[in-house]
Amino acid sequence: MTDYQLATLAVRAGQVRTEEGEHSEPIFTTSSYVFRNAAEAAARFAETAKGNIYSRFTNPTVRCFEERLAALEGGAACVATGSGMAAILSTCMALMKAGDHIVCSDSVFGSTIALINRYLVKFGVEVSYVPPHDNDAWRRAIRPNTRLFFLETPSNPLSLIADIRAIADIAHERGVLFAVDNCFCTPALQRPLDLGADLVIHSATKFLDGQGRCVGGAVVGSAEVVGKEVLGFIRSAGPSMSPFNAWVFLKGLETLELRMLAHSAAALSVATWLERQPGVTKVFYGGLESHPQRALAQRQQKGFGGIVAFEVQKGRAGAWACIDATRLLSITANLGDVKTTITHPATTTHSRITPEERERAGISEGLLRISVGLEHVDDLKADLQRGLVAVQGVA
C-alpha cells in the first residue's frame, strides 16, 4: 500500500481477511498452529515456507500490527515486543556483542540509561554518552568498535531536538547503525527512516495506543537487520507482544494522526501559557519561539508533539506542591494518553539513575513533565494554575 497516505495506512495496512469476511481485525488467541502434514511443519521450521509456527514469534494479529506500523514508518520490516524497553533490549542483544561500543544520547528515558549501565555493560558492551544536539560530539565519540548510535528525539523530558539526517551521515561514514526512539512524535509527526536512520524504536504503550490500555513495543527497519536479526532474537528469547495487545494497538493506530495533531496543538497552547506564569522559571517545548532547536524541529517534524516540561521555583518542594494541588491532571509517569498526566521525573522516570546522570541530562529537582491530553486546554490551564499557586505558598 505504498501509494496511500499515512491516514489511510493507519486504518487499512496489514489486514488480511479470513474466510469469515470480518471487517475489523480478529484477535488470534492461539499459542500454536496446525500443519496440514509433516512436510509442511518441517518446511516452516526450516524457514523454506512461510506460515505460522508458534505465537511467540508468528501470530496473525501481531503480524497485522507489525505490517501496519512498518508501513507508517516506511520500513521494510517490523518486530513487535512486549514493551518499549523490550524493543531496546532486543535491538541491542540482536545487533551487539561483547567488546562492541554504543554511543547514546545523554537525554534519553531513564530506564534506557539504566538498561545500558546496569545490564549491557555486564556483558562487555562499552558506552559513551553525548549531548543529542551536538553533532561534533557524536563524531568524536566514535571508536573502531562502535556498532550503534542510539538517539531519542525529541528527548525525554526536555524536548531537545537532534538533527537526525546529520547524525545518520556521521554514523554511516563509519559503518555504524543508527537507531532513533520515535516515541514522542510517532510516524504521524516524524519518520526517522526517511531522514537516514536505520532503525526506529517505539514504546507502543504511549501514543500508538493513545489511551493507556496496554504495554508493548516495536522495532522497525530493514528486512535484513530487523526482519532477520532482531526477529531471530525475539524468536529465541521470547519478549513477545500478546495478540490482544496488538489488537488494541491496531485500534490506536487508526486515530493516530488525528490525535497527534490535536496533542500538538494543545501542548503548544499550554506551553505558551506556562511561559507567562509566575513561579515558572523555564519551559521546554520544541514549538516555542524560545526553543533553540525550533527551526530544526520544523524541518524534520510535522508537529511538536504532546510533551511539555517546565521548571518551577523552590525545587522538589515546589514541584511536589504543584503536582499535589492539581485536581484534573493524572499523577502518573505514563504518557501519550488522551488524559493529561503529570510527573516529577527526578523521583519517578529518572529516579533509577544516579544524581550525576540526572544532572547531565538536565533533570532538576524543580522539573515537571506533562503529557498534554485531549481535554479542553482552558480546563488544563485552570488546573495547572492551582498547582502554580501552591508553589508560591511553599516556604
Image: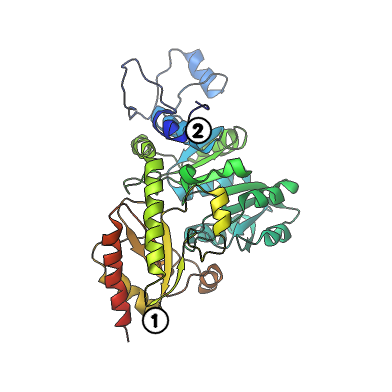
Work out whether mark 2 precedes mark 1 in sequence or the reverse, and give the earlier one: 2
Tell me the SS state at disc 2.
Answer: helix
Residue 99 position, x and y percent, is 69, 53
The circle on residue 49 is none
Residue count near mark 2 (Cα–Cα under 10 Å), binned few <14, some 14–19, many ≥20: many
Residue 18 position, x and y percent, is 36, 18
* Mark 2 vs 1: CB contact within 8 A: no
The answer to which of 355 and 392 lies nearer the viewer is: 392
Q: State left or right for residue 120 relative to residue 304.
A: right
Residue 205: in sight, yes or no?
no
Q: State left or right for residue 96 relative to residue 394.
A: right
Residue 313: in sight, yes or no?
yes
Residue 291 vertical position relative to residue 69 in the rendered view, above or below: below
Q: State left or right for residue 66 relative to residue 91.
A: left
Residue at point 37%, 20% (across, down)? 17
Residue 362 position, x and y percent, is 52, 70
- Tell me the kind of residue under disc 2: Ala
Residue position for label 1: 314
The circle on residue 71 is 2
Residue at the far left in the pictured view: 327
Which color scheme is applied?
rainbow
Residue at point 33%, 54% (across, down)? 373
Residue count near mark 1 (Cα–Cα under 10 Å), binned few <14, some 14–19, many ≥20: some
Rounded to the nearest angstrom, the CA distance separating label 2 from label 1 is 47 Å
The answer to which of 187 and 85 lies nearer the viewer is: 187
- Tell me the kind of residue under disc 1: Lys
Q: State left or right for residue 292 relative to residue 270.
A: right
Q: Quadrant of residue 395?
A: bottom left
